Image: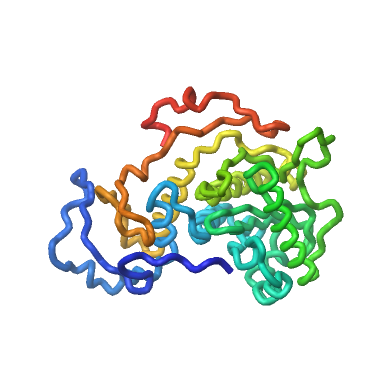
Amino acid sequence: MSRARGKPVGGTAEVPIYTRATILDNGLIGAKPANKTGIERNADIPDPTSTADDLYALNCLQLFREMPLEPMSVQIPMENVIDNLPKPLHLRVRIAPAGGTDVFGADVEGIDTVIKQTYENYDRLWNMFAACEYIFWPIEVATGHFVTAIFHLRQSNVVESWSVVEPQRGEKGLKTVARVASVIQKMFAMKNIVVETDSYRDDSHKDPEEGFRPWSLPWVPPADYGEDDSQVWHSGIRSFALVRQLIWRVLDKYCKKEEHDESFWTEPTCGWLNIDQVRHDMMGICAVNTIYNMKWYARLAVECIERISTVEGVETFEASALAPVEEGKFTYLPGADEDTTIEDPNDQAGDQDMSG
């Protein structure tokens, strides 16, 4: 349903290339033998292809800071959040398979036919609407540009409330949301999914002032992707951050034995979003998933690097390009009618060693 994954310069997910690396060692890891050892001949150790998806997602996340994410790199960390919920929530809360640009991109010709061909018999998605209460759906609307569709179902195949969240403000953001929402409505009509009256959640109920443009709920910190959308690389990170916060809301209600209410939508998300810290969380999830899929016959290690030259279509760059950047990180007043910062970013950076 999404664009094909990129290909590394050397090796593939199916036929990986093995190499030795310079690993930091504090005396607990031990030197890597020069020749093959028993562990490399151990039949109990899974083939690395068993963890190809998680490893691919991890490597996309850690290639360089402004690398636009693949759908897999967004979806896998989201699914991990659900995997670690209490078991009774596993079937109530799901992550839909990432939507792709072939359906949700701009200027898709013959959209009705494309929707039918792509989604009419896509049981993996529709089974969720038949069985779940909450569905979160990362959707790629252009290469590396993600928005988030959110659904609450009253009962099987009955959508009680929903929205499409795009952090980009202004006319472009509104057009993206309108296009995605229109496609979703066409899909619902095709599958006879009931969408209740006034189910879409935004703040358009407010008395609009001149120039006021409503945003979908819940409120999220605004994103500036640039006039040419060249900065959409962090949209996938924002999508993960939003879904994680909303899943925690569901979990909190579950622990308090409370039912769903409108605060799920009306309560703004946190006004502080550290893109680099969230990316690192996602990297950690994919790394541990990789170890899990290797049946714990693996562990994390830190490889020393000087420069990166293996990104297809990208010139060699220094390792410093991986470092967090504090400039442009703002704290916002959650839910304000106009995007309002409460601190100067240069004042809130604090200890650089603690901020990344």
Q: Position of residue 187 (x, y in %)?
A: 74, 67
Left or right: 38 in relation to 161: left
When asked about the image quadrant of residue 249, the answer is top right
- All told, the count of numbered labels is 0
Residue 73 visible in rendering? yes
Q: Which residue is depicted at the point 42% across and 33% down?
A: 355
Front one among 191 and 114: 114
Q: Which residue is depicted at the point 64% across and 40% down?
A: 220
Q: Position of residue 321 (x, y in %)?
A: 35, 44
Q: How is the image coloured?
A: rainbow
Residue 88 visible in rendering? no
Q: Position of residue 349 (x, y in %)?
A: 45, 28
Name the quadrant of the N terminus: bottom right
Left or right: 169 in relation to 272: right
Q: Position of residue 356 (x, y in %)?
A: 41, 37
Front one among 16 and 206: 206
Left or right: 191 in relation to 235: right
Outermost residue on the front side: it is 228
Outermost residue on the left side: it is 34
Q: Which residue is depicted at the point 62% across and 59% down?
A: 94
Q: Which residue is depicted at the point 46% across and 50% down?
A: 282
Outermost residue on the right side: it is 197
